[in-house]
Amino acid sequence: MKHWRRALYLMQTIEGLAGGLIGVFIPIYFLTLGYGLRDVFYFFIVNNLAILVLFLVAAAFAHRFGFAKTIGLRLLFLSANLFLLFNLKAYPNAFYLISLLSAAEIAFYWFPLHVIFAKATDHDKVDEHVSNLMALPALAKALLPFFGATITALFGFKALFVVAGVFYMASAVPLLFVGHIPVDVKISGAKIIEYVKRFKKYFAIETLLSAVGEVEGYLLPIFLFLLFKDVMAVGAVATYLSLGSALFTMIIGKYSNHGNGRAFLRAGALSMALVWLARFTAETQTAFYLLSVVAGFCGVLISVPFSSMIYRNAKDSHVEDFIIFRELPISLGRIALYLLALLIASSIKWSFVAAAVAYLALIFI
């Protein structure tokens, strides 16, 4: 089990390097090509609907062919996705095909990762293992958004996609050395209903956190780009967020193991609500930079204990089926967020208030 965790730590760290380079800039790339905000929101709605379906496909594929081949197929989806992103200006009709390919590569990466990690964790050290899984990628990619912005500013988005592609391809290598990992998928409609009833609080928390995660990951960078007309500002905010997160994750993981997870989650929710209200009133780049560092610290109070809850729930039920079930609240939260974004597209800053309200709601769940 230990060598499984080591392989996952390395794989997720390399993946984090690629994600740090490219992640926040994809919707901005669409905007620079002339797509509107609503186009971007529809892109993510289609993407998340497809992820929900393709998680089932990825699970069925892994059940029959194993995780190594699942990750291998993911690389094919990823290569096609990056190729179309690179050439989107020449093939503008590929916009929604990119959304579908992105969904496929996400499903065929995250299903194996979550299942393997859930099986590889020790029940009494879940928080510590989760903090390692989260901290190493966060630390590795801390400066990557800034470097990604620099590459984009100097050489353009296409150069950014090439560099990120190299890291994405390299991320699959560690999993090739972990040997055979059994996969057993038994999901059914009845089991999903059972899990919804059994994990009501988890379902509600996951839905809210998935929604606010999209505000942090995509709506905030879009807002900053439209406000300051500067990709460097977007990269800097993402970098400060990663730094704050990486520095605090390992500490929270150790203390959360002592049964403080629920208290940490509520404290983090209250703190993040205040951060989002402060972002709503912020006007300068410096203010957004400082608030991103604070958000990095406060967000860890939520992410580590909640991620531990996910893997404990998985270990206490049927791992593969729970990981598939988990995509339901994730997709619902994200799609609801983008439907809201469509309504407030002319003033997406109000999504910051919605994020604050969602965090406050977490306190009472």
Image: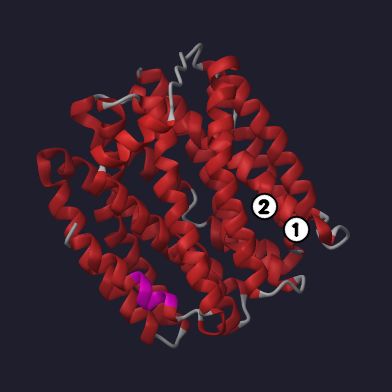
Is residue 33 highlighted in magenta?
no
Amino acid identity at mark 1: Phe
Residue 214 placed where, x, y %?
47, 61
Question: What is the spatial separation of the Cα atoms under label 2 and label 1, in whole angstroms?
Answer: 7 Å
Q: 304 or 209: nearer the eye? A: 209
Q: Is residue 66 left or right of residue 355?
A: right
Is residue 353 highlighted in magenta?
yes
Residue 152 placed where, x, y %?
69, 64
In contact (CB < 8 Å): disc 2 and disc 1: yes
Callout 2 secondary element: helix
Residue in the picture at 39% in, 69% down: 292
Q: Residue furthest front?
A: 190
Q: Which residue is mark 1?
A: 95
Q: How many residues crowd around disc 1 within 10 Å: few (fewer than 14), some, or many (20 or more)?
A: some
Q: Which residue is mark 2?
A: 99
Q: Is residue 261 left or right of residue 355?
A: left
The range drawn in magenta is 351-355
Residue in the picture at 48% in, 39% down: 13
Colour mode of the rendering = secondary structure
Amino acid identity at mark 2: Ser
